[in-house]
Image: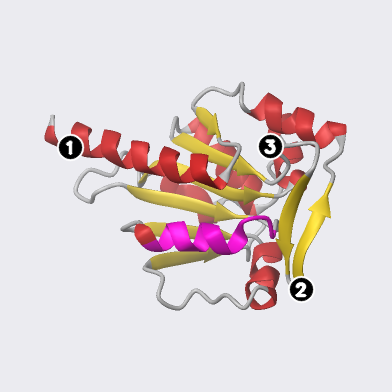
Amino acid sequence: MAQRNKQKKWAWALSGSGHFFQESLDVIRTLGDVDLFLSRAAEELLPMYRQSLRGLSVRLVKERSASSVSVARFYQGAYHTLIMAPMSSNTVAKCVVGISDTLITNVFAQAGKCRVASICFPCDTAPALQSMAPKGMVDVYPRAIDLANSNKMASFERVHVVWSMDELIEAVRSRTTALGEKKEG
């Protein structure tokens, strides 16, 4: 049954990629009502990057159960958009082949099944890139399979893959504008 009396909200999934982790939290801070889905790996990253969830207006959903109880709100029509940023190569690979055995991969699967628009930012977007690690910038060379999986995800229905932080910010801005137009029209 669709959620009618309450306004739909953002669902944001953080996986275990440190690539643009802090910047993703900064974008979350700019949004209104957000349910933040944290993988176990994302929970481990928070203290490593000296980030806390303090100051975020979010409802936290942590990986604590093996069933899909945590994602039931997708079926209740609670969300207009899922954002998965950053996405580890492991998460992307599982999503691409349809494995939903973790909170984050289950969120992706349920968003697709409920026809919720998704914006995805894989960490592996170029053959060579620099990424912030806990002790500073590091060079990263994604494998061909990781790049292929990111490209394959871009072909999925209702999935908008972004390839940079700037594109993520623009996609969120565009989605916010589109949602505002729908409410008025």
Place of residue 137 in the rendered image (x, y in percent of width and height, measured from the top left): 75, 63
Res 135 label? 2
Place of residue 14 in the rendered image (x, y in percent of width and height, measured from the top left): 59, 56
Circle nearer the viewer, 3 or 2? 2
Number of numbered discs? 3
Q: Amino acid at mark 3?
A: Cys
Circle nearer the viewer, 3 or 1? 1
Region in magenta: 18-29
Q: Examine the rendering and report whether any part of residue 75 can be seen.
A: no
Assign a secondary structure to mark 1. helix
Res 95 label? 3
As displayed, is residue 45 above or below residue 163?
below
Q: Which residue is mark 1?
A: 183
Q: Amino acid at mark 2?
A: Lys
Estimate the spatial distance between the alpha carbons at disc 1 and disc 2, rounded to whole Å: 44 Å
- The tag earlier along the polypeptide, 3 or 2, is 3
